């Protein structure tokens, strides 16, 4: 991008600056640290970046224009000038009725998309009356047993006007089927349904641990969802390939994107093996990243991820449809960065992290409530979190220029370095036979744990400052309204489940579950029989049991 003579002049001028201006100051005052690195230590930071640090940058092939390959500067031509990112606050609590109320509240307050959290039993494919569910019903999210619960959650919420993300993985096909069934009942054309299911089982084995079946049948379920959606629900994002939890488990920024894109590669390969055409399903693959503390590193990470994915889809998979190459992502501010001490500080952390996500070109964003280190967020803290996004959108000005940090010597240089490091990690994954093999051998988890351990030691030694935790402490008990979970919810939910079971046509349920068992034993797509089963009010637990019977359950080997 720069004339070689100009670069030589700049290099020479920098040497002069160092000798004449910098060194005397360094001798008198020194610097705060011997070396400065990115938050996760992967990249050593220069004191000052100049055009010389981006001498190899080729504007056309490395950056290009927004809406054009390699999408470094954003996936849409107008980005947030055309449409603000979706403000999508993750919510789900207790019963279906309470979740419906929280959703309506969020819509009233200007939330532009819904994001549904499920309780642990639902995420593990158990009904509320299962022994394994005791004590967990409605705790980390809403309890969904049957279509009846989903009808209540979406009561008065027209599915053709809102897009909904569902954080559901092992039973993703079941919840997708329920969403489709609700749409059918509301008379919404399936082609108009918008939303996302997380459906990312690989990161469950790596970091989140909410799996049910072994990897092979889990991958089949995912491929079946790709195929079903391409034909029936073409606007639905069939997966949210998630680095968020990998980062929460303590990975570096480069590991976060490398392992996430590695998972993406594995899903694409499986779908191709199953006979799908890359351009039929790749446009609906979506991503989910963490918006962590270090603003410049995070912005560089998002840009690097976009560039890398465009290249992978082009070079490795020969994708022709531009949409197949566009990495669209949701971001959530880093839950693990929130502190129980001086809870108000979390509002500030969240705001900076959200700023990084927006500067990095996010399509959708969740900002954490300040109290999430302690409990489920209260309505008040959810509102402040949403207002944080609205202030960014309408007051800060950062949404008004596309990729405003593009061209910053520091950010371009970091983008290159993170991309290069992620590439190296992806090569190491390939050497281990791909992501699934690397995950099953325990290698991926060990890579992350090593970094997490180092980070923890840095905090304990005081080398890494966490404000209010190992520095700037105050002697006070946290004063905070805790959102109470109603312990009676479990009993009421079980009663409702009993009513559903009493009301439904048992023969129809049995026939639907038998048809599903047949499909599972053969190789037909599993989603249509799951849709039939949910419409007959078969429960999440019953459907998951049929598949458990056929597929078995995953036992981690490491
Ligand atoms: C693709 C994304 C990232 C975003 O989808 P959205 O529908 O919000 O946005 P979008 O697709 O970018 O935009 C919507 C429509 O507007 C159009 N559009 C957008 N911007 C535009 C622009 N500037 N110019 C022209 N058109 C534009 C798009 O093309 C699209 O239409 P067309 O479709 O017609 O093109 C999706 O996957 C998503 O919403 N993900 C959310 C995931 C999530 O909430 N996860 C929560 C996890 S919570 C979690 O895991 C917590 C921890 C735990 O539980 O463990």
Image: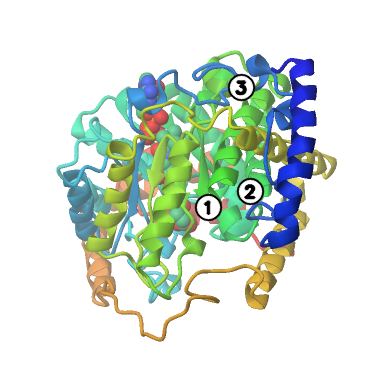
Q: From the image, tell me which residue sits under label 2.
A: 253
Is residue 299 depicted above or below 51 in this figure? below
Judged from this view, the residue extending furthest toward the right is: 431
Label annotation for residue 194: none
User: Residue at horizontal 21%, vertical 42%?
Assistant: 110
Residue 120 percent coordinates (x, y): 43, 64
**Based on the displayed image, in which of its 4 quarters is residue 441 positioned?**
bottom right
Question: Split into 4 quadrants, where in the image is the C terminus?
Answer: bottom right
Cα–Cα span, label 3 and label 1: 23 Å
**Based on the displayed image, in which of its 4 quarters is residue 433 positioned?**
top right
User: Residue at horizontal 63%, vertical 72%?
Assistant: 459
Cα–Cα span, label 2 and label 3: 20 Å
Q: Can residue 44 be seen?
A: no
Residue 89 in the figure: left or right of residue 126: left
Is residue 249 depicted above or below 340 in this figure? above
Disc 2 is placed on an element classified as helix
Q: Specify which label sits upstream in the sequence, 2 or 3.
A: 3
Is residue 366 depicted above or below 362 in this figure? below
Q: Label 1: few (<14), some or many (≥20) within 10 Å?
A: many
Residue 30 percent coordinates (x, y): 71, 60
User: Residue at horizontal 66%, vertical 22%?
Assistant: 62
CB contact under 8 Å: marks 1 and 2:
yes
Disc 3 is placed on an element classified as helix
Q: Specify which label sits upstream in the sequence, 3 or 1.
A: 3
Q: From the image, tell me which residue sits under label 3.
A: 63
């Amino acid at each position: 991008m720069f004339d070689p003579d100009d670069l030589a002049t700049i290099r020479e001028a920098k040497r002069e600056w160092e000798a004449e201006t910098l060194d005397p100051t360094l001798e008198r005052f020194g610097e705060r640290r011997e070396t400065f690195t990115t938050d996760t230590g992967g990249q050593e930071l220069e004191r000052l970046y100049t055009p010389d640090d981006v001498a190899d940058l080729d504007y056309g092939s490395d950056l290009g224009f927004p809406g054009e390959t390699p999408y470094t500067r954003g996936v849409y031509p107008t980005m947030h000038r055309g449409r603000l990112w979706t403000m999508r606050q993750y919510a789900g609590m207790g019963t279906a009725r309470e979740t419906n109320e929280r959703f309506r509240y969020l819509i009233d307050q200007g939330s532009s998309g819904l994001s549904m959290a499920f309780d642990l039993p639902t995420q593990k494919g158990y009904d509320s009356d299962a022994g394994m569910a005791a004590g967990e019903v409605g705790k980390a999210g809403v309890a969904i047993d049957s279509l009846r619960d989903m009808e209540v959650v979406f009561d008065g919420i027209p599915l053709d006007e809102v897009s909904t993300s569902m954080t559901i993985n092992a039973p993703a096909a079941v919840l997708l089927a329920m969403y489709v069934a609700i749409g059918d009942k509301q008379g919404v054309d399936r082609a108009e349904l918008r939303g996302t299911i997380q459906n990312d089982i690989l990161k469950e084995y790596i970091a989140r641990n909410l799996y049910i079946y072994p990897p092979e049948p889990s991958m089949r379920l995912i491929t079946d969802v790709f195929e079903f959606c391409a034909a029936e629900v073409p606007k639905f994002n069939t997966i949210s390939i998630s680095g968020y939890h990998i980062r929460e488990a303590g990975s570096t920024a480069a590991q976060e994107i490398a392992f996430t894109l590695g998972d993406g590669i594995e899903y694409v390969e499986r779908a191709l093996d199953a006979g799908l055409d890359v351009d039929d399903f790749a446009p609906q693959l979506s991503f989910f990243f963490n918006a962590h503390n270090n603003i410049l590193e995070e912005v560089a990470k998002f840009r690097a991820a976009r560039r890398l994915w465009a290249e992978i889809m082009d070079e490795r998979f020969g994708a022709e449809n531009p949409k197949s190459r566009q990495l669209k992502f949701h971001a959530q501010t880093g839950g693990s960065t929130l502190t129980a001490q001086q809870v108000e500080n979390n509002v500030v952390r969240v705001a900076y992290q959200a700023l990084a996500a927006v500067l990095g070109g996010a399509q959708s964003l969740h900002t954490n409530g300040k109290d999430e280190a302690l409990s489920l967020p209260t309505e008040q803290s959810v509102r402040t979190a949403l207002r944080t996004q609205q202030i960014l959108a309408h007051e800060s000005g950062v949404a008004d220029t596309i990729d405003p940090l593009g061209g910053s010597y520091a950010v371009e240089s970091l983008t290159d370095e993170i991309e290069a490091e992620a590439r190296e990690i992806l090569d190491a994954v390939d050497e281990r036979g791909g992501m699934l093999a690397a995950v099953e051998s325990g290698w991926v988890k060990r890579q992350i744990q090593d970094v997490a351990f180092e980070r923890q030691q840095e905090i304990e030694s005081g080398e890494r400052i966490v404000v209010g935790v190992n520095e700037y402490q105050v002697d006070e008990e946290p004063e905070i309204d805790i959102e109470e979970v109603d312990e009676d919810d479990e009993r009421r939910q079980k009663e409702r489940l009993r009513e559903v079971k009493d009301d439904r046509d048992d023969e129809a349920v049995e026939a639907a579950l038998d048809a599903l068992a047949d499909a599972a034993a053969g190789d037909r797509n599993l989603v249509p029989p799951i849709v039939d089963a949910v419409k007959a009010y078969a429960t999440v637990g019953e459907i998951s049991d049929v598949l458990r019977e056929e597929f078995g359950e995953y036992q981690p080997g490491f």
